[in-house]
């Protein structure tokens, strides 16, 4: 067995998984677990395809301590390869992943590279594999906000164009891909692996004790997450957000786990001290997965600019106010508990909070196939793909490809 590979006996296909940021970890964990389950069930069937798999962590989220917490809590194996890309501009991060991942792919020679989400590591890994004529599978394909000023939107568009297998989380994502000329044969509506992880661990999350640590009561606080450059990089908009949080704290305690990027921007703008001194506002360091889900499941409402939080609150039945004017996850609005609020209109944000506080229980419903079994569907498609001979030749010519 080649070092760095986890093989399930007689291997029919080798998968190289790539993660770079904490949301990727949440989405990837159930897929790797489902591959192992598939291999175990196929052990007694000589005709069944079995997989080898390895894991690459690009290090795009370079807080090693927080990465370790997520890996441990999610049950992810230690990465076989850690690229240590670290911070930088979008171009720098993308270029570094391309440069550092290529020798890994040449050494591992996988049949398929599996990427999740829409971060710079997702795009770079997909491009690197495609240029080496290695098949690409994209989990969470077809999400579109329609806003090309978002770097994530560009990552989604390009990744989907080079992917061979596109796994979607809701039916509208299929429609987006079809409009962009993607063959229906490449598109597979499987559901949402982020919800797979949530369903597996939510029971543990509600018992971790984070509410007691922060002296919060169930359904009696607001949870806030903010990290997008559009909300935190402009000092004027950040000042507006700070004012909004102080106003909300007049009625409801506010718990704000502060992203490292956001903390730096608040500090530079002279706003961090205002929040730290405001009664009713509790700032914490970034939280592990279980602590955050524990808080999210107990909150009266969540105020966020995160994509994944929109999905998780929908399943948890917690009202979510997303401080954006567009979302790539419209199903969380049409079927779930999410509502978009203009991040430039402080009065509108506060009014939306008041409406939530005055309303009864949230009435959203769980979207189709958000049932905790998306990863199993993904592995079944991969097995069909491998069994069809799509990877029979493998990337045999990889070493000779000029790049």
Image (cartoon, rainbow, N blue to C red):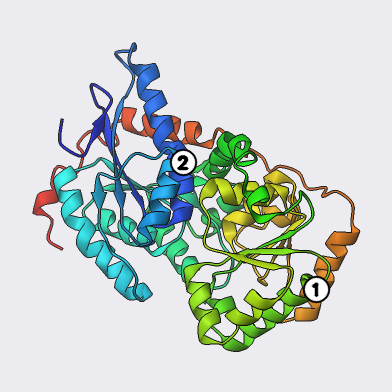
- Between 195 and 176, the one lying in front of the other is 195
In the rendered image, residue 126, in percent from the top left (x then y), is placed at 33, 56
Q: CA distance from mark 1 to mark 2?
A: 35 Å
Q: Which residue is mark 2?
A: 74
- Between 66 and 49, the one lying in front of the other is 66
Q: Is residue 246 above or below residue 362?
A: below
Badge 1 crowding class, 10 Å Cα cut-off, few under 14, some 14 to 19, many 20 or more, is: some
Quarter the N terminus occupies: top left
Residue 367 left/right relative to 261: right
Quarter the C terminus occupies: bottom left
- What residue appears at the point 25 percent right and 57 percent down from the top-left corner? 83
In the rendered image, residue 224, in percent from the top left (x then y), is placed at 65, 64
Q: Is residue 70 above or below residue 239?
A: above
- What residue appears at the point 39 percent right and 61 percent down from the top-left corner? 61
- What residue appears at the point 46 percent right and 37 percent down from the top-left corner? 30
Helix, strand or loop for disc 1: helix
User: Residue 350, labelled with which disc?
Assistant: 1
Residue 350 left/right relative to 291: right
Q: Is residue 126 visible?
A: yes
In the rendered image, residue 251, in percent from the top left (x then y), is placed at 83, 67
Q: Is residue 224 above or below residue 276?
A: above
- What residue appears at the point 75 percent right and 64 percent down from the top-left corner? 253
The part of the image, by quadrant, that contains residue 320 is bottom right
Helix, strand or loop for disc 2: helix
Q: Earlier in the sequence, mark 1 or mark 2?
A: 2
In the rendered image, residue 28, in percent from the top left (x then y), is placed at 43, 44
Residue 86 left/right relative to 292: left
């Amino acid at each position: 067995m080649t070092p760095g590979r986890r093989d399930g006996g007689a291997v029919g296909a080798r998968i190289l998984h790539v993660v770079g940021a904490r949301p990727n970890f949440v989405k990837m964990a159930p897929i790797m677990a489902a591959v192992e389950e598939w291999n175990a069930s196929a052990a007694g069937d000589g005709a069944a395809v079995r997989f080898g798999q390895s894991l690459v962590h690009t290090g795009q989220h370079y807080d090693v301590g927080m990465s370790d917490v997520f890996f441990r809590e999610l049950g992810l194996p230690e990465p076989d390869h850690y690229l240590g890309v670290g911070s930088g501009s979008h171009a720098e991060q993308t270029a570094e992943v391309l440069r550092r991942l290529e020798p890994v792919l040449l050494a591992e020679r996988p049949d398929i590279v599996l990427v999740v989400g829409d971060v710079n590591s997702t795009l770079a890994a997909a491009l690197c594999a495609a240029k080496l004529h290695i098949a690409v599978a994209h989990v969470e394909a077809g999400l579109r906000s329609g806003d090309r000023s978002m770097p994530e939107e560009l990552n989604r568009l390009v990744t989907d164009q080079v992917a061979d297998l596109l796994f979607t989380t809701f039916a509208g994502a299929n429609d987006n891909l079809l409009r962009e000329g993607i063959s229906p044969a490449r598109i597979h509506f499987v559901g949402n692996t982020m919800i797979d992880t949530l369903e597996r661990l939510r029971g543990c999350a509600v018992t971790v004790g984070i509410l007691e640590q922060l002296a919060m009561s169930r359904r009696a606080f607001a949870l806030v997450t903010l990290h997008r450059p559009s909300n935190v990089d402009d000092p004027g908009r950040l000042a507006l957000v700070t004012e909004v949080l102080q106003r909300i704290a007049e009625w409801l305690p506010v718990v704000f786990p502060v992203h490292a990027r956001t903390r730096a921007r608040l500090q530079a703008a002279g706003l961090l001290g205002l929040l730290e001194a405001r009664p009713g506002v509790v700032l914490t360091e970034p939280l592990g997965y279980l602590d955050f889900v524990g808080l999210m499941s107990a909150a009266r409402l969540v105020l966020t600019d995160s994509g994944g939080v929109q999905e998780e609150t929908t399943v948890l039945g917690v009202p979510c106010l997303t401080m954006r004017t567009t979302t790539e996850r419209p199903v969380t609005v049409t079927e779930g508990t999410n509502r978009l609020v203009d991040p430039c209109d402080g009065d509108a944000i506060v009014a939306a909070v008041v409406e939530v506080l005055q309303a009864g229980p949230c009435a959203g419903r769980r979207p189709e196939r958000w049932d905790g079994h998306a990863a199993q569907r993904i592995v079944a498609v991969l097995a069909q793909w491998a069994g069809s001979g799509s990877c029979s030749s493998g990337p045999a010519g990889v070493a000779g490809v000029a790049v």
